[in-house]
Image (tube, helix red, strand yellow):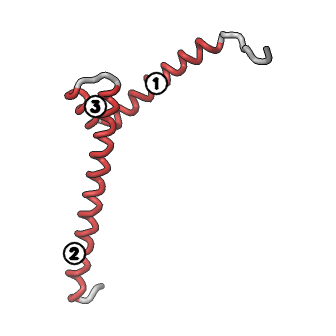
Amino acid sequence: MLPEGDAGEHTAGVRTADALFAVLLVVAWLALVTLTAGGARRRGQGRSLALVTGLLFPLTWVAWYLIDQRSAGRARGRSAGAPAARGR
């Protein structure tokens, strides 16, 4: 147990650390929202839809991953049947 004089200082230090953590969490979240919304705009979405996309960035990332994997699979499938031109 802390002596009475130190209890207030300890509590203030914990509050400061919690506030700093909250600020860092909000800054990181806003950065991810901004980057995701920017990516949505580059993919052709309007501003309001890009903002919603940014706010829901975890779902957006999963959707983009699945879409990109399907596109990559189709591209690999097309090139897989072509004969190799090595050694000619």
Instruction: Say which residue appears at 21% left-offset and 88% top-offset.
Output: 4
Tell me residue 68's x, y (percent).
46, 24
Residue position marked by numbered label 1 in the rendering: 68
SS at circle 2: helix
Q: CA distance from mark 1 to mark 2?
A: 48 Å
> Which of the 4 image quarters holds residue 42?
top left
Closer to the N terminus: mark 3 or mark 1?
A: 3
Residue toward you, 54 or 14:
54
Q: Which mark is residue 34?
A: none
Other-residue count near label 3 (Cα within 10 Å), few / some / many at <14 / 14–19 / ≥20? many
Q: CA distance from mark 2 to mark 3?
A: 38 Å
Where does the C terminus fall, quadrant-wise? top right
Instruction: Say which residue appears at 48% left-offset and 19% top-offset.
Output: 71
Instruction: Say which residue appears at 59% left-offset and 12% top-offset.
Output: 78
Q: Amino acid at mark 1?
A: Asp
Other-residue count near label 2 (Cα within 10 Å), few / some / many at <14 / 14–19 / ≥20? few
Q: Amino acid at mark 3?
A: Thr
Tell me residue 57's x, y (percent).
32, 36
Residue position marked by numbered label 2 in the rendering: 12
Q: Which mark is residue 53?
A: 3
